Every structure is written in structure tokens, then in C-alpha cells.
């Protein structure tokens, strides 16, 4: 396929990943990028194995989903071992060829000028898809932004593998028509040190200017609907139940607080890393007599109703009703839940994970910080914040202003306009200084 670049007023931009659906960081940040691009009057299209976008603007390819049975079986033979059989290699490349044809059809069908590869060239959740896209980019020279959220060397479960040759080739590739974007300084330095690839740093952001964060008619009775009273203290852990989230620290906190009517809410399901940690958290909460509530069955990415008429809420419906956010992660690519807590003006307990130390802490946020374990001083600070309204108000107002300064949509607009300029010479269209759609 001959790539047709056009210096027109509007670009056709295609996002490619294994999934654009739900509340995971890749799906959320991709939507924000698309909002900015569309605010510049470009058109965005979507390719994934799970997709909740308008069918007219997307291509759903079930085999591209990282949890498709074929990919799950293949991944099981590639990680935790050092060699692979010839048959396994053939399966990688057979699946690659199928996905490659689909990617070509996506590019040609929507006449794409630019591709945004969302994390599929960084973390090897779907080896054939990463190889397929790498070959398409190499063969067409299509301008590509590789948006890397986390790399394979950051996850222990990928370190022992039978595909070092493929990881070196495609995770990520280094091709002339590609620009690489990372979401934190640590990743930027590691990428350069390990591969020699330079990258642009664009933080995850949130719409501090326009986001609706209050209680409205829909979510007004959320507490009662979920079985809580107005006097209950709701502590929210807004993450998946996976070990790197450090949720045990939230359990220890609730156990040790000298505050009545405490409840710990955990918003997400175990996700894609197994059920063992989830079971351990349940057992630990039971032993410690911590009132923990898993509410993921009541949450969705959009408001809706169950067949029996019960409301289905979004995570953003829960935030206004909470009293404290716990974020004791051991590792994060950036920290969307941190930004959400700041946006909703909620006090925050946070573990000082590496990216927080380098990219967030220096900005001056007022939080209760721990270093991998819960100290008595941290527990007493949480009690102070829960009991002292003036202290709480000063904390959250300061944090909101810092968040708006450093992690708002305006910073994302600047970053994406720089990328477009690097590909096309000038910003093809749109008003960088104004709001979305020129507002």
C-alpha cells in the first residue's frame, strides 16, 4: 500500500490497541487524546478486539483482544519459559498475518493519515498484534505515534520469556516514521537507556476546566442505594484488585483508624492478572474484620440500568460521596486515580511509588504519603484530615489548583500539537489557545 500523506485541513487519525472499552488507563487516555484531536477538527477512528465506540468509526477484530482464547493460549507458551518450539513460532506469525491484513484494511478503509498505537508496542499482551503493526509501519511508512503506558521490563511476569528476539524487534520498534510518547520521566530515561530511542513526555491529564464532579439528580441517592447512611465514612480504593496496587495498606488503615462507621469501597474487579490476590484481600479483610465492599458490579463506564431497574453508576458518581481516597500502589505508569482524587477535591493517602516521586511529588501536592508501609504517624494524619474540616478544605483546594496547573487538557493540547507539527510541518487545523472545537 502506498501511503498518501495529505496536508489538508483535516486528518484521519486511527487509534489501534487490544481494547478500547471500560475504565482502564489506556482506554481513558485514548479518549482524551481523541477529544483533543477532534477539537483540532480531525477525525478519529478505532481498531481493537473490544470496542465501545460508534461502529461507523471503528473496526472490531475479536482476535486482537488480549484475552481472546487464541492469544491467551499463545501467551501461556511464551512467558515463564526460555525457549519456544517451531510450532509456537509458526502460530505467532500465522496470527500476525491475519491481524496484519485487518490493520491494512483499517488504514485503507478509513484513509488514515496518522496511526496512534496505544501501548501495544510497549507491553507484550498481544505478541502477534504488535508484530503485525510493526511490519505495517515498516512497509507503509505511515506516520505513527507510539503511546507507551508501560513497558515489558517494568512487569516481572514478562521478564522470563521465550521471545527476546521479538521483544527487541517490536516492543517497541524504532522506525523512521514513528514518534514515541511516554507518560513519565522514569520510562523516558529507561527507554533511552535500553533501546536508544528518544521520546516525548506527555503526562496523563484530566479536564480540570470542564469536568462535572458534583452530586446531581442521578447519583444523589447513591449512598442509600448501595446500603450506606449519611454518617458512614466511605474510603475509596479506586483501582483494580491486583497486587501492585498495594490494597492491603488500605485494609491496615481502616483497621487502625479510631473513627466510627468506616467502610472501605473497592471499585474495580481483579482484571487480567488472576484471582489469587483478590482472594487474599478478601481473606485478610475477613480476618481483620475490615468492612470492605467490592462495588464493581454496580459500576460501568456509563450510566445505565440493570434489567430489574437498578441504577448502574460510573466511578465518577462514587467520588463525590467519598471521604478519603487510598492510593497505596507499589508501581504505576502515572496515576489516573491520583488525578481523579485531586479533581474531586478529596484527601488522599498515597504510597510514594517511583513515578510519583519523580513526576508528581515535586509539584507540591498536599497528601498523606507513606513509603511502602503504613506508619502510626500516617494513621494519625488521616484521622486529623477526616475530623478537621478546615484542614481538609485547605488540602484539597491547594491540590486542585496544582492539578489544574500541571495536568490539565491545556498541557495535552500543547504536546499533541507539537507531535502533529513534527509530522506535518504545521498544525493542520484547530485553535490551540481556545477550548474544544474552538470554544
Image: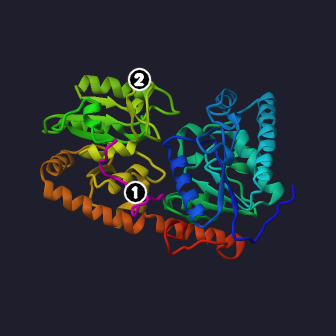
For label 1, the SS is loop
Span colored in magenta: 204-218
The percent position of residue 12, horizontal first and vertical second, equals 70, 59
84 displayed left or right of 255: right
Residue at 58% x, 57% y: name it: 34
Residue at 30% x, 39% y: name it: 249
Nearest-to-viewer mark from 2 and 1: 2
200 displayed left or right of 100: left
Label tally: 2
404 displayed left or right of 388: right
For label 2, the SS is loop
Residue wearing tag 1: 211
Front residue of 107/248: it is 107
The percent position of residue 436, horizontal first and vertical second, equals 51, 65
Q: Is residue 17 magenta?
A: no
The dominant secondary structure in magenta is: loop
333 displayed left or right of 356: right
Residue wearing tag 2: 308
User: For the residue carrying disc 1, how many other residues have a C-alpha within 10 Å: few (<14), some (14-19), or many (20+)?
Assistant: few
The percent position of residue 251, horizontal first and vertical second, equals 28, 34
The N terminus lies in quadrant: bottom right
The picture quadrant where one finds residue 246 is top left
Q: Is residue 217 magenta?
A: yes
- Residue 251 shows in the view: no
Query: Do the numbered discs 2 and 1 sit on residues whose CB atoms are within 8 Å?
Result: no
The percent position of residue 430, horizontal first and vertical second, equals 60, 71
Amino acid at each position: 500500500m502506498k501511503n498518501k500523506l495529505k496536508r489538508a485541513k483535516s486528518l484521519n487519525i486511527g487509534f489501534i490497541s487490544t481494547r478500547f472499552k471500560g475504565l482502564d488507563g489506556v482506554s481513558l487516555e485514548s479518549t482524551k487524546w481523541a477529544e483533543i484531536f477532534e477539537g483540532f477538527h480531525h477525525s478519529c477512528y478505532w481498531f481493537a478486539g473490544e470496542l465501545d465506540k460508534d461502529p461507523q468509526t471503528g473496526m472490531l477484530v475479536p482476535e486482537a483482544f488480549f484475552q481472546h482464547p487464541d492469544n491467551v493460549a499463545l501467551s501461556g507458551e511464551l512467558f515463564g519459559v526460555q525457549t519456544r518450539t517451531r510450532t509456537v513460532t509458526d502460530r505467532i506469525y500465522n496470527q500476525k498475518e491475519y491481524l496484519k491484513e485487518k490493520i491494512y484494511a483499517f488504514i485503507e478503509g478509513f484513509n488514515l493519515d496518522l496511526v496512534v498505537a496505544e501501548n501495544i508496542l510497549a507491553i507484550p499482551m498481544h505478541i502477534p498484534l504488535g508484530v503485525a503493526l510493526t511490519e505495517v509501519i515498516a512497509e507503509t511508512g505511515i506516520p505513527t505515534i507510539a503511546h507507551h503506558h508501560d513497558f515489558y521490563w517494568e512487569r516481572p511476569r514478562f521478564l522470563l520469556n521465550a521471545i527476546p528476539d521479538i521483544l527487541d524487534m517490536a516492543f517497541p520498534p524504532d522506525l523512521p516514521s514513528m514518534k514515541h510518547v511516554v507518560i513519565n520521566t522514569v520510562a523516558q530515561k529507561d527507554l533511552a537507556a535500553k533501546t536508544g530511542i528518544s521520546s516525548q513526555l506527555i503526562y496523563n491529564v484530566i479536564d480540570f476546566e470542564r469536568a462535572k464532579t458534583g452530586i446531581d439528580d442521578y447519583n444523589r441517592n447513591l449512598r442509600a442505594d448501595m446500603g450506606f447512611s449519611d454518617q458512614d465514612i466511605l474510603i475509596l480504593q479506586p483501582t483494580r484488585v491486583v497486587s501492585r496496587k498495594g490494597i492491603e495498606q488500605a485494609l491496615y488503615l481502616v483497621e487502625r483508624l479510631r473513627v466510627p462507621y468506616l467502610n472501605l469501597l473497592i471499585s474495580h474487579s481483579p482484571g487480567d492478572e488472576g484471582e489469587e490476590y483478590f482472594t487474599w484481600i478478601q481473606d485478610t479483610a475477613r480476618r481483620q474484620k475490615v468492612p470492605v465492599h467490592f462495588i464493581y458490579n454496580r459500576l460501568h463506564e456509563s450510566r445505565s440500568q440493570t434489567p430489574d431497574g437498578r441504577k448502574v453508576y460510573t466511578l465518577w458518581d462514587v467520588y463525590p460521596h467519598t471521604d478519603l481516597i487510598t492510593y497505596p500502589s507499589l508501581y504505576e505508569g502515572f496515576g489516573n486515580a491520583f488525578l481523579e482524587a485531586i479533581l474531586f477535591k478529596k484527601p488522599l493517602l498515597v504510597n510514594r511509588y517511583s513515578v510519583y516521586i519523580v513526576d508528581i511529588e515535586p509539584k507540591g501536592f498536599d497528601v498523606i504519603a507513606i513509603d511502602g508501609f503504613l506508619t502510626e504517624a500516617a494513621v494519625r494524619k488521616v484521622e486529623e484530615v477526616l475530623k478537621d474540616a478546615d484542614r481538609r478544605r485547605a488540602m484539597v483546594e491547594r491540590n486542585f489548583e496544582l492539578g489544574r496547573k500541571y495536568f490539565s487538557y491545556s498541557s495535552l493540547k500543547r504536546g499533541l500539537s507539537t507531535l502533529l507539527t513534527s509530522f506535518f510541518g504545521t498544525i493542520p487545523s484547530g485553535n490551540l489557545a481556545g477550548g474544544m472545537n474552538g470554544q
